[in-house]
Amino acid sequence: MSDAKQNSPENAPAPESLENKESQDQAKVGVYICYCGGNISDHVDVEKVRSRMENVPGVAVARTNMFMCSDPGQELIMDDLRSGAVNRVVVASCAPSLHETTFRSAIARAGGNPYQYEHANIREQVSWVHHGDAATDKATRLVCAATGKARLMQPLEPLRVDALRRGLVIGGGVAGMRSALDMADRGIETVLIEKSPYLGGGVSRLGKLAPYGEDAETVVRDLAARTLSHPRITVYCGASLSSYGGYVGKFSIELSTTAAEDEAPSPGQYVSGKGVGGPMLPQNIALETGVVVLATGFSSYTPHTGEYGFGENQEVMTLPDLLQKLAEMKDEKGGQLHLDGRRIRSLAIIHCVGSRQIPGVHEEDENGHLNEYCSRVCCSASINAANTIRESFPDTSVYELYRDIRTYGRGQEEMYAQASANRVVFMRFNVEEPPVVRRIAGEYPLEIEVKDELTFGEELQVPVDLVVLATGMEPAPIHDLVDMLKLPVGADRFLLEVHPKLRPVELPMAGVFLAGTCQAPMDVGEVSNAASSAAVKAVSLLGKGFVELDPFVAEVDLQKCTGTGACVDACLNDGALKLVEMEVGGETVTRAEVTPALCLGCGACVAVCPENAINVNGWTLRQYESMVDRIISDVAFEDSGEAKEEPAVEEETAA
């Protein structure tokens, strides 16, 4: 359909059309059961399940394969569809979140309808939790239930929604600018907003980038210059999202001005440690966009007072602060490092401050949070800083105190080896016996006491002029966006993608994508890759001028609907359901109307309708009832080779 409305009074489909009753007798269900390389077959007798499925009414074909998701496995399904042996497909394998898209695509390539497909999870729900005959019997019932639903499936068509060829990028750091440029270069008009007066984000506070030593200022200047001069990109600094509505292809957005902490620079002007000035949003504005890319960045962990002497000694600072100071003095070389007028003869960098925190060992923040994840980039940033200091100021000694070293990317292991060549001294400590920083009287202001596991637990005292805390990454404070857009958040409080491998930059809400460190700790290279991935997804979505969505949305039977409004009250997504006045049978009546592009397909409306006047396409009440009937039935356990006749499903009656 060309717009987002359905259920017009002149052409109101009855619920019977959803369930495809006229084709029940012609349903030819193919059942395809996966060994999953032993993940399933080690505990489920797959061949026995296949044999049992051959007894189930409506099942035309039952087959097995070592890996149904593989090309040979998909070919089994496609060959049966092409030959006409089956017209509905049931796959019994791992969780549908992993390969549902895979099998739908295979069905479509074979000329079938991808929505006449049902998935039975017999790995996570069976073989991983049950064993022996019990596992085989449960798998049988789950697959049998799936065939009950499959025989009632009708061919559905994706919803078509007109899409504006415009994208909104929220965040003006490297991820935001990279996404905006990639979209604009491919013909998409792009609006980029940044709440501060500057473009560049956290990279603006850095000097040399790990592992190859690129100059952060040059990177930011180049990206900002290209962004500000691009004819398809409109930049608004000092702007934030104040209102959000609509659906993929046509989001309604309102932008409001934000108070700047300092005076806004001229557009294009670079300010050290802050970034490149951008044009400020002059006034609150409203706009429409087809997609939204979130590039809201990260925050650095702030140590609590007393953590390794932080806040109690001026000689204790965080790694981001040190990196910014090194960036400001990048042209200075020789002798010893001097910071804020102090001579630094030796310094120590303590790793994993605010990362890999352990309950009962580390102190929670004021909200009761612990950062139990690894921030990934701190090790390389620390080693890069150590190399920079040793190469620029060879008379300053550097000590690295770490729990574990994570140099995982291209060129990072070489950087680690270079640190050893530069005579950076490494000491490894146990998390339960962390280094102790204390002030001392004498030549050096501070001393670190550490039990070094590299020297078999020897206790060392290291006098230093400076202690640097390698603080981890935390999610940026975007609670307003999370609430406004109903964004999913993981246990680590970063924004949560649909699937880390199959859909790594997508969110459950269609048309909203993730870019960069709003999703997880990343280095600049990973940020750029993620941002380009988000841009490619956005461009592919908008490129045709319309968006196709899965048809699993609510549909109202206007002949049964009495306009009670119970469905509207139960709806979980504002705007997906509403009551409207319309002409039915020559009378003006109030009926429920669905906006399919906003419908979540959750079924909350179905559960509360007193007239059974609403169903979800692809998950009708009769399909559920058929699944339950099959689960409790023993039809699949019959040993006879004769096909068993199953009673016809009766008409639904109003609750």
Image: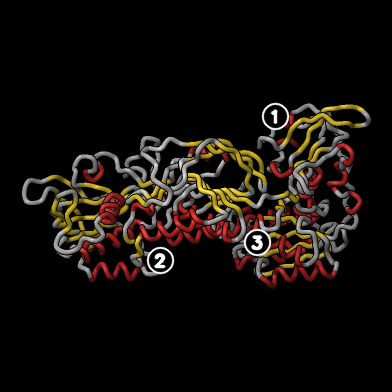
Residue 372 seen in render: no
Callout 2 secondary element: loop
Q: Please report whichever mark, 3 or 1, sits nearer to the chain's N-terminal start.
A: 3
Q: Do the residues labelled 3 and 1 touch (CB within 8 Å)?
A: no
Residue at label 2? 409
Q: Which residue is drawn at 71% across and 63% down?
A: 105
Q: Which mark is residue 267?
A: none
Residue 348 image offset from top left, x and y in percent: 21, 55
Please tell me how crowded label 2 is: few (under 14), some (14-19), or many (20+) other residues with Cα within 10 Å.
some
Q: Is residue 318 above or below residue 457?
A: above
Q: Which residue lies furthest to the front in this view?
A: 266
Residue 103 image offset from top left, x and y in percent: 70, 62
- Residue type, label 2: Gly
**Residue mark closest to the camera, 2 vs 3:** 2
Q: In this view, does 56 lie above or below 288?
A: below
What colour scheme does the image use? Answer: secondary structure
Residue at label 1? 569
Residue 376 seen in render: yes
